[in-house]
Image: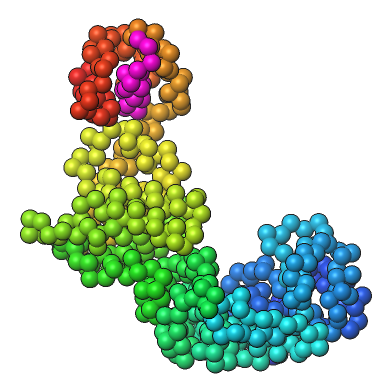
């Protein structure tokens, strides 16, 4: 039987873990230089790296590389003078006693923060920018830790003395898996309202419970999340809300949704998702419940064995999870009673517009928006199709093969079908399974074809063969060739030229585009009559 380590052995293991990092992590080579050249320096490792190292030791979690240090006992100019010998320094935070350090020869995604001990004075607006910071080389590390948000983030490692400094029992909260505010929760959140969202995020990230008193303070204060300061500035910027929201959802989608809902945050920052509650659906198609329950089930199934088996290499990006959350956001405003049941005609297009407004409000990037909007806009394309095999290969390929977001759409299609429960508990997977077959068929057809249509036919070819100048018929004919290429009926330039020559007389009937017809309708008509 393996011996259980004693408390002292545990402490030794923990301390050895910190010392090992200092000795072996390349970007930390400067520490020994600092402590040697500045004999009055007391250096502390603080923040996320301390928390994550303790978690790694206790629970085999992966340690982060988010290095932050507090340098006590020396003036900031002394610190700068020595650090300059070993890397570059960004002095933008110097007046707050904060340096951003880039060690020579090391590539970092984020700089190393080295700061003097600091105190903070809040104006009580709930806005982080309204907190005044004052650095003091003689301030104790305990006083510096007192300004931090959560106990699990208020632990320091004393490098000089090789010991942990933990005035708020953060280690105990790590062991008991609790998220707890430092000091009085309401006062802590009043200083910076975004800390409420951070508490939720850490609860999701580590699957910790939120301490009762901290949770009650969040529920009481969360209505302030959209409040304005006396200068008409948002207490919590939309940018911060987006970052915290996406991190929470990516870490644990279902728990994030539940905590946001139960805390009242969902109503404040995503009222459109709040409206999914009690939006009833026909039980013959959705026995799982209303739209909110359906969405919650989809988030849950995104981490299920079924999903992982179907998509073993899936990468759960923040945008993908957000797309799952918003995929049916158009249903409440399109709900209509028709033929003795609730219908949601065009909820995909309406939902796309609503999602666009949400993401503009929360300042998503264009790249982020494109993925989410593509998912929502196209999620019903084959979900309710009478016959997947009657849909043109081109339309299927555009959505499920050629788009940079094709895989995410296919994954949403799978989850949406899996979570649309019939009264007997079964899921309508037929269309999804047939879509996979159709995708494979299209890929096999393409194996022996040129990738670009220009290698088969171009506008000049069409004009010469038909004896016409540039008119809408050129584009129409090209679209016909593309459709035939996608279906495997035309696989070379010779076959494309032969098709146009053979059908020249018929195609010329469309020299003048009928005003009452769209080009897509004409293309389908030509395909039907020339097949």
Main SS category, magenta section: helix
- With respect to residue 425, does 356 lie above or below? above
Q: Name the residue: 46% across, 27% down.
A: 451
The image shows residue 420 at horizontal and vertical percentages of: 24, 59
Whether the magenta-drawn stretch holds residue 113 is answered as no
Q: Name the residue: 26% across, 65% down.
A: 291
Q: Name the residue: 58% across, 92% down.
A: 183
- With respect to residue 409, does 112 lie above or below? below
- With respect to residue 495, does 89 lie above or below? below
Q: Name the residue: 31% across, 13% down.
A: 499
Residue 54 appears in the figure: no
Q: Is residue 303 left or right of residue 31?
A: left
**Of 31 and 182, the residue lying toward us:** 182
Task: Locate residue 450: give its quadrant.
Answer: top left
Task: Locate residue 255: give its quadrant.
Answer: bottom left
Residue 519 appears in the figure: yes
Magenta extent: 468-487
Location of the N terminus (image quadrant): bottom right
**Of 159 and 329, the residue lying toward us:** 329
Q: Is residue 52 left or right of residue 22?
A: left
The image shows residue 173 at horizontal and vertical percentages of: 55, 87
The image shows residue 43 at horizontal and vertical percentages of: 80, 80
Farthest left residue? 340
């Amino acid at each position: 039987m393996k011996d259980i380590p004693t408390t002292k052995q545990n402490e030794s293991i923990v301390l050895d873990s910190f010392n090992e990092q200092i000795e072996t992590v390349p970007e930390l080579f400067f520490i020994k230089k600092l402590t040697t050249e500045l004999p009055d320096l007391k250096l502390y490792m603080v923040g996320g790296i301390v928390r994550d190292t303790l978690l790694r030791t206790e629970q085999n979690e992966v340690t982060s590389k988010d290095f932050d240090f507090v340098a006590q006992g020396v003036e900031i100019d002394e610190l700068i003078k020595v650090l300059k010998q070993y890397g570059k320094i960004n002095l933008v935070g110097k007046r707050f006693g904060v340096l951003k350090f880039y060690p020579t020869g090391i590539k970092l995604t984020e700089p190393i923060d080295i700061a003097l001990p600091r105190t903070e004075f809040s104006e009580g607006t709930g806005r982080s920018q309204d907190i005044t910071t004052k650095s003091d080389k003689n301030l104790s590390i305990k006083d510096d830790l007192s300004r931090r948000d959560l106990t699990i983030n208020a632990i320091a490692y004393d490098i000089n003395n090789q010991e942990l400094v933990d005035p708020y029992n953060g280690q105990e909260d790590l062991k008991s898996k609790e998220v707890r505010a430092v000091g009085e929760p309401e006062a802590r959140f009043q200083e910076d309202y975004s800390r409420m969202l951070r508490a939720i995020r850490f609860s999701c990230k580590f699957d910790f419970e939120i301490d009762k008193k901290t949770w009650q303070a969040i529920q009481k204060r969360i209505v302030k999340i959209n409040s304005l300061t006396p200068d008409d500035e948002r207490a919590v910027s939309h940018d911060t809300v987006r970052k915290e929201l996406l991190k929470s959802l990516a870490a644990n989608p279902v728990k994030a949704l539940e905590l946001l809902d139960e805390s009242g945050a969902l109503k404040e920052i995503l009222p459109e998702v709040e409206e999914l509650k009690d939006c009833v659906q026909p039980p013959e198609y959705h026995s799982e419940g209303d739209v909110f329950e359906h969405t919650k089930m989809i988030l849950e199934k995104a981490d299920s064995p079924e999903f992982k088996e179907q998509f073993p290499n899936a990468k759960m990006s923040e945008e993908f999870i957000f797309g799952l959350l918003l995929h049916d956001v158009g249903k409440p405003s399109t709900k209509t009673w028709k033929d003795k049941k609730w219908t949601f005609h065009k909820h995909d297009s309406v939902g796309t517009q609503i999602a666009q407004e949400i993401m503009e409000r929360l300042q998503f990037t264009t790249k982020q928006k494109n993925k989410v909007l593509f998912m929502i806009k196209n999620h019903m394309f084959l979900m309710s199709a009478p016959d997947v095999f009657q849909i043109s290969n081109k339309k299927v390929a555009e959505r499920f093969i050629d788009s940079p977001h094709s895989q995410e759409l296919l994954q949403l299609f799978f989850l949406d079908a899996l979570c649309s429960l019939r009264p007997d508990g079964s899921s309508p997977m037929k269309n999804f399974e047939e879509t996979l077959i159709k995708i494979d068929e299209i890929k096999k057809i393409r194996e022996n074809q040129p990738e670009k249509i220009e290698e088969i036919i171009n506008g000049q070819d069409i004009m010469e063969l038909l004896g016409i100048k540039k008119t809408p018929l050129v584009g129409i004919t090209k679209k016909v060739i593309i459709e035939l290429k996608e279906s495997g009926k035309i696989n070379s330039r010779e076959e494309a030229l032969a098709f146009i020559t053979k059908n020249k007389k018929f195609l010329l009937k469309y020299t003048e585009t009928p005003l009452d017809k769209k080009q897509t309708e004409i293309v389908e008509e030509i395909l039907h009559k020339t097949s």
